[in-house]
Amino acid sequence: MDNLAEHISSHGRALLNRRDFLRQSGMAMGGIGLTQLLAQDGLLASDNLTVSGKTPIRPQIDPNNPYTPRASHFPAAAKQVLVIYCPGAVSHVDTFDYKPELTRFHGKKPPGIPQVTFEGPTGNIAKPFWDFRPRGKSGKMVSDLLPHLGGMVDDFSFFHSLNTQTSAHPQGENFFNTGFTMEGFPSFGGWVTYALGTENQELPAFVAINDPRGMARSGKNNFGNGFLPAAYQGTDFNAKNPPSNLARPNRYSPTDDKRTVDLLNRLNSKHLEGYPDDADLAGRIASYELAGKMQVSVPDVMGLSHEPESIHKEYGTDSGSNTKREYAKNCILARRLVEKGVRVVQLFNGSDPSGGNGITNWDSHNEILKTHAMQAEIMDQPTAALIHDLKRRGLLDQTLVVWCTEFGRMPFLQANGTGRDHNPDAFTCFLAGAGVKKGFSYGESDEFGFKAAVDPTSVYDFNATVLRLLGLDHERLTYYHNGLERRLTNVHGQVVKEVMA
């Protein structure tokens, strides 16, 4: 007969010895007693806490229906968000941040200005390349570079003391859109759709509308899911390039197509029954089902030709450069997506297929008078028309608009005498719509627009505020990853309550 002890682990064999059995049993009973005593005194570790000492709020997600709408943490007016992102770094001192001292010191080099910045030696202070004038009832000073957006300042809340951690474009885009300079972290839109799902089950929860010229420097990282489930990455398409592979082949009739989809749904459901806890499988099936629904919904939302001529004229699809006309169509598409209930729409104004440098985006190291004017001609009228159209249709009552860029530009010229270098220490962005004060400005940069001076506001603070306006607690919206409770704002961020209506 076999010796059964040979088939037992060393730990198991130790328990066959009476003395070891009693010793280990005694230690186990003592541990149970100690655990109870510690629990009575509240000294046991609880569930994972955030760095703020708060309990995480993780959405209850059905893997079979990852986009089901979910309640926000707080009551909030904003149910959707439209992010208008301008890659390349818009010059705040030439657009929204009026600094009379630049005119006074034009051509001079006051003390305190660094000798070298991101791209090399610095030149002298340069006054704004466009005149500023008061706009709206609030009298907000905005330059002539953006007359259409300038005419809407009474609807905006400006952040004038923003600062960031990097002066490089890829890292700057990552930091603004994901909260980290490195790649691999979830985007803002990914966090929002993870938390809230979406009301419209026929379209993606998160759509990224890339510039007609291509993607920004950090590409899909700007709208990626990072370590969140893949369902929460942005779906990228624009007015010129609709989603791929949705068209039904001509050799199939609509009836054949429907029967095929119905058969696949039955097969998928049957397969899923055998793997009820496989979230990845359920997520893939959900994405395929959404793709099937998009075969009907996308052609409808992409039908810009159905818009009246007055809308096309207002947005500017019939005037200016070809890029401006295509961007204007993207703006109409953004409005239609918001109108359909898409939770997050991210609209890009600028790309970076070959370095940008003012030609494909706002990165104006040379000839800023020419290059910023080129970008403004593309961005100003369509963007203002988009915001005005949302307001006219009552959509701003539930939509938060975020206009942003990764950092600002220097108040002095580069050594070439025609461009402004990167400025991570002061820049301007604005909010509009649901839950936001109108005609309001928060914070100030210094007299030259060089550094944030009054109420300095980090990108963490900005993102925390945007999440709060959507009813989300940035300290408790987390995802457990690699032993850490990760969040959009890392371990930082304070909500700027002053801009909240």
Image (tube, rainbow, N blue to C red):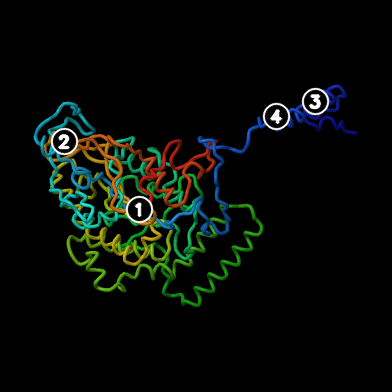
Disc 3: which residue: 24
Using the image as rendered, state which of residue 211 and residue 71 is in the foreground.
71
Residue type, mark 2 in image = Phe
Q: Which mark is residue 38?
A: 4
In space, the residues marked 2 and 3 are separated at their CA atoms by 75 Å
Is any part of residue 405 visible from this angle?
no
The reply to whether discs 4 and 2 touch (Cβ–Cβ < 8 Å) is no
Q: Which mark is residue 412?
A: 2
Q: Does 483 appear above or below 309?
A: above
Which residue does the image show at 34% across and 45% down from the upper left? 218
Which residue does the image show at 61% across and 38% down from the upper left? 47
Q: Quadrant of the N terminus?
A: top right
**Residue 375 left/right relative to 265:** left
In space, the residues marked 3 and 1 are separated at their CA atoms by 61 Å
Dot 3 crowding, Cα within 10 Å, few <14, some 14–19, many 20+: few
Q: Earlier in the sequence, mark 3 or mark 4?
A: 3
Q: Earlier in the sequence, mark 4 or mark 2?
A: 4
